[in-house]
Amino acid sequence: MKQSLRFFSLGIFVSTVVMGMNYWIGPNEQAESTATMDEIDMINEMEAGGYNVLTDEQLQEKVNQAVHSQTTAASKEESTNETDGDERNQADEVESQEKDSEEGEENKTKTYTLVIEEGISSTDISQTLEQQGIIEDAESFDIYLSDRKLTQYIQIGEFELSESMNRDEVADTITR
């Protein structure tokens, strides 16, 4: 009985050593299955999925073009108002001022000071940002934070956020 127990424990020991060696020395399947993509491949993949990939310079150029087109449209509207009769000019000026004040309010970027206190969840933060118009979808922003494991890096404090910020910028701001 004593000898058979020794052989049994020796068999367990040998099988443990063999399995351990196979684990440490054997092929790493996970490392082989993950492929790294270079920048060009990533851009091609994104464009194939229907996304537009822009450099910072291209984005700034598009923003400048949009601002320029808005200002030229506003100046054309003002020049047509000046060519009309006196009575109509006065009425148009009032309407133009109302439109300008409305456009001024629309063109103003809405900002919000987010106060994060201890114990607040990322879901609560996302819902607050959606209610304030900083982000469009609270659920997708919360998933974005979770997928990138950013929820653990959310900082306590006050943060200035604007509706012109994209979700990466908002996430970077609250996780500094």
Image: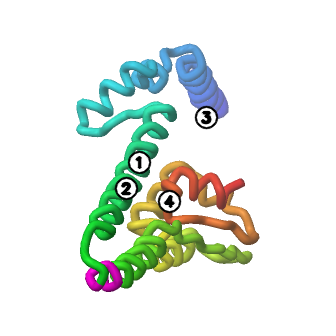
Q: Quadrant of the C terminus?
A: bottom right
Residue type at numbered disc 4: Ser
Q: Quadrant of residue 14?
A: top right
Distance from Cα at disc 2 to Cα at disc 4:
17 Å
Say if 59 sits above or below 88 in the image.
above
On the image, numbered disc 2 is attached to which residue? 70
- Was residue 36 drawn as part of the magenta stretch in this picture? no
Task: Determine whether, in the image, residue 160 is placed left or right of residue 101.
Answer: right
Residue type at numbered disc 1: His
Picture disc at residue 1 = 3
What span is colored magenta in the figure?
A: 87-91
Distance from Cα at disc 1 to Cα at disc 2:
5 Å
> Closer to the observer: label 3 or label 4?
4
Task: Determine whether, in the image, residue 132 is placed left or right of residue 73.
Answer: right
Residue type at numbered disc 3: Met
Picture disc at residue 164 = 4
Distance from Cα at disc 3 to Cα at disc 4:
79 Å
Residue 7 in sight here = no
In front of the other: 2 or 30: 30
How far across and down, in percent of the image, does residue 137 sit? 39, 67
In the structure shown, which secondary structural element does the residue marked by tag 1 occupy? Answer: helix
Which residue is located at x 64 percent, y 76 percent? 120
> Closer to the observer: label 1 or label 4?
1
Sequence-wise, the earlier of marks 1 and 4 is: 1
Say if 156 sits above or below 148 in the image.
below
In the structure shown, which secondary structural element does the residue marked by tag 3 occupy? Answer: loop
On the image, numbered disc 1 is attached to which residue? 68
Which residue is located at x 45 percent, y 19 percent? 38
How far across and down, in percent of the image, does residue 24 sit? 59, 20
Assign the magenta stretch its main secondary structure. helix
Residue type at numbered disc 2: Gln
Q: Are marks 1 and 2 in contact (CB under 8 Å)?
A: yes
